[in-house]
Amino acid sequence: MARKKPARLELIVGGYSAIPWCVIDSDSFKGASNKAKSLLLALMRQHNGSNNGRLHLAKKWLYKQGWTCDEGNRKACHELIERQLIIQTRRGGLNMGANWFALTWYPISNYVSLDITAATYVKGAYSFCNLPPTARRKPPIRKKIMHHDYRDSPGSPTETVRSLTGTTTELVKPVLVTSTGSTTENDVIKPLPTVKTVKRIVGVKVKHD
């Protein structure tokens, strides 16, 4: 009696996109930037088994998928073409629709309306890519911000004191003195002299000396 094959416990239910291990392990894929790899996975979502060569990266479709940076999308698409992971099969334009692309590890079953033929299409072109890994973007340099020692009193004036070993900064607190009169050298408060005022009464003549 023939033995029954064990059931596949991790079988996927529903549609899915397949990418061979030979593509993942290739220098073309491993050397691509993270954004280019993500865009490649998004493009694979359109493949249904019979439309390779008619995949597109239209702006409206990309926006629905969360790809809203036009400049970044163009760079990622150009990188995928350079690394031969995809190939442009038809040039779009005004009243012609979007550009069409093909995944280079799949065959093309229908060449109608395409700008390439079966004689010019090279399946597995990704394996011939000899480009170096795409340069990664360097993280921005953070500037160090110097803070005062006394953070509870921002904006306090400071005074620089020179010493033999270097220069240090000390906090100088302003001293406010309130007074009701003039002060002397001994900080003795004296009242201000009062000014005599003369009241004028209507109907009374003022005597002049």
Image (spheres, rainbow, N blue to C red):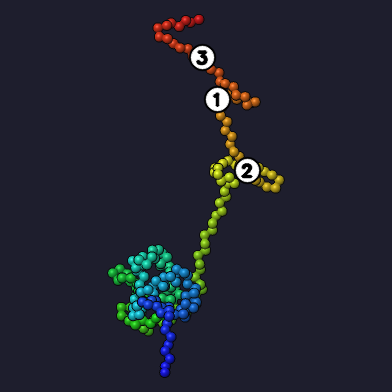
Which of the labelled discs sits on residue 170, or is there none? 2
Q: Secondary structure at mark 2?
A: strand
The residue positioned 45% from the left and 12% from the top of the image is: 199
Q: Amino acid at mark 1?
A: Thr
The residue positioned 42% from the left and 84% from the top of the image is: 7
The residue positioned 48% from the left and 5% from the top of the image is: 208
Dot in front, 2 or 1: 1
Instruction: List the single residue furthest toward the front.
Output: 1
Q: Quadrant of residue 200?
A: top left
Q: Secondary structure at mark 3?
A: loop
Q: From the viewer's perspective, tell me whether residue 157 is left or right of residue 3.
A: right
Which of the labelled discs sits on residue 196, or is there none? 3
Q: Amino acid at mark 3?
A: Lys
Q: Position of residue 159 (x, y in %)?
A: 62, 41
Is residue 102 visible to us here? no
Q: Secondary structure at mark 1?
A: loop
